[in-house]
Amino acid sequence: MRPVLRHLDQYFSGKFRQYGATPRGVDWKNKFAQVIRFKQVMKIVELDVGKRFTLNDLGSGYGAMFDYLRQNGFEKFSYRGYDLSQEMVDEGRRLFGRAANFRIQKINHPRQMMPADFAVASGIFNNKNGFSNSMWQRYILDTIDCMNAASRRGFSFNVLSTYSDKEFRRSDLYYAEPLFFFDYCKRKFSPEVTMSHSYGLHEFTLMVYKRGV
């Protein structure tokens, strides 16, 4: 896993240096693509919107998720961003560091996350950066294992789907079998798992709820 993480640090730091604190700076096509995915992964807290919660944002970049939450009716939350890129973390602190409910830090491995009510990961599993499909799948499984260990009430993540039209697939991206990951999460983490695969993008979002587990 460590070679993957080192490469991701270099890749995303390079994107940030090129495009700055923008959706493209964290490897999204545009703001619409970024926000629609934020909306999907944040469905994990739909039943808890009016309650206080802590949120781990893995692969947070400069903390755009925090800004999204503030602008979309989330009030009683504490945000904790985690990223491999020190440059991203520094920018997040510059942009949002004065907010009392904002924290962001550089990590070298997902297991360094602190315990929280929920965890989300958006877009960190898409670009396999030349690694084999088997190594990339192992990286995803290891990462969601860490998300589960650090989450008290649930976690969510998105991945590109093998149901994508073959003629539009890119060789540098990873396309996952949705049913494999649904089954993995349901068997290993919780009987309460929801999958969304109908929001206009070539991907799926899995939400793992730990209520009653």
Image (cartoon, helix red, strand yellow):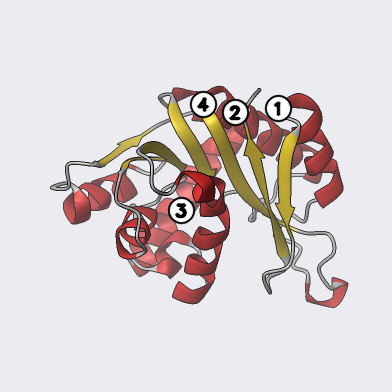
Q: Could you say where residue 103 lies in the image, as x and y percent from the top left?
A: 27, 39
Q: What residue is shown at x 35% (from left), y 54% (from top)?
A: 74
Sequence-first tag of 3 and 2: 3
Q: Residue at x 51, y 30 (%)?
A: 110
Element at badge 3? helix
- Read off the residue under disc 1: 189
Instruction: Name the residue tied to disc 3.
Output: 12
Assess disc 4: are there few (<14), some (14-19) or many (≥20) residues with their C-alpha within 10 Å of its C-alpha: some
What x and y, as percent, mark residue 57? 44, 43
Percent x, y for residue 42? 51, 52
Q: Looking at the image, do the residues carrying marks 3 and 4 touch, with CB atoms under 8 Å apart? A: no
Q: Which residue is mark 4?
A: 152
Of tags 3 and 2, which is closer to the observer? 2
Q: Which residue is mark 2?
A: 148
Q: Nearer the viewer, residue 28 or 103?
A: 103
Name the kind of residue labelled 4 in the image.
Arg
Q: Is residue 65 left or right of residue 192?
A: left
Q: Amino acid at mark 2?
A: Asn
Q: CA distance from mark 3 to mark 2?
A: 24 Å
**Quarter in which the C terminus is drawn:** top right
